[in-house]
């Protein structure tokens, strides 16, 4: 809401653009300095980030933009996913709640590509989907799913 500037005092900055704050500070310093020049820059606070872990190529804290970022935006900013999409699950922790969905669901259904909030933790988990073939086949074997939505006949 406000900042303190030596010789200018406390200045209200909430809701103002950086260039407006710059002009205001220069005005406040006009009688106290010769031709004051001010540079105002806005940095992202750590409180406005999402933590990305797991199978992300570049995990860490990802800053959220002012317009809001969706789940896939944050995954892309973190460098994408190392594992195949059909083997990756998205685990979102928000406060005391955690939900897990397949990444293919998020990609194929825009309603699942939700906006993330500051403080969320996004974990990308690789979990290869397999089935176990037993019985009259002659040998028991675990076979990975190579496609989404495989039927029993295809297996």
Image (tube, helix red, strand yellow):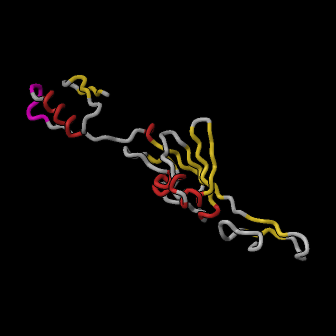
Find residue 40 and report its horizontal and vertical position in percent: 24, 39
Q: Where does the magenta region start and end?
A: 31-36
Residue at (26% x, 27% y) in the render: 12
Residue at (62% x, 52% y) in the render: 101
Vertical arrangement, residue 32 with respect to residue 140, above or below:
above
Find residue 58 and report its horizontal and vertical position in percent: 51, 56
Side of 36 where 61 appears, left or right:
right
Residue at (38% x, 41% y) in the render: 44
| Between 26 and 104, the one nearer to me in the picture | 104
Residue at (56% x, 56% y) in the render: 106
Side of 74 where 23 appears, left or right:
left
Vertical arrangement, residue 91 with respect to residue 137, above or below:
above
Find residue 29 and report its horizontal and vertical position in percent: 14, 28
Find residue 60 and report its horizontal and vertical position in percent: 51, 49
Type of secondary structure dominating the magenta stretch: loop
Which image quadrant: the N terminus? top left
């Amino acid at each position: 809401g406000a900042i303190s500037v030596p010789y200018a005092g406390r200045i209200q900055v909430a809701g103002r653009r950086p260039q407006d704050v710059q002009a205001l500070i220069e005005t406040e310093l006009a009688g106290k300095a010769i031709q004051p020049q001010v540079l105002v820059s806005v940095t992202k606070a750590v409180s406005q980030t999402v933590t990305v872990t797991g199978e992300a190529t570049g995990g860490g804290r990802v800053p959220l933009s002012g317009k809001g970022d969706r789940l896939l935006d944050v995954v892309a900013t973190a460098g994408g996913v190392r594992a195949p999409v059909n083997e990756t699950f998205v685990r979102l922790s928000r406060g005391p709640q955690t939900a897990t969905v397949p990444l293919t669901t998020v990609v194929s259904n825009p309603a699942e590509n939700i906006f993330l909030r500051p403080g969320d933790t996004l974990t990308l988990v690789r979990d290869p989907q397999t089935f176990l073939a037993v019985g009259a086949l002659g040998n028991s074997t675990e076979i990975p799913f190579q496609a989404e939505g495989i039927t029993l006949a295809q297996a």
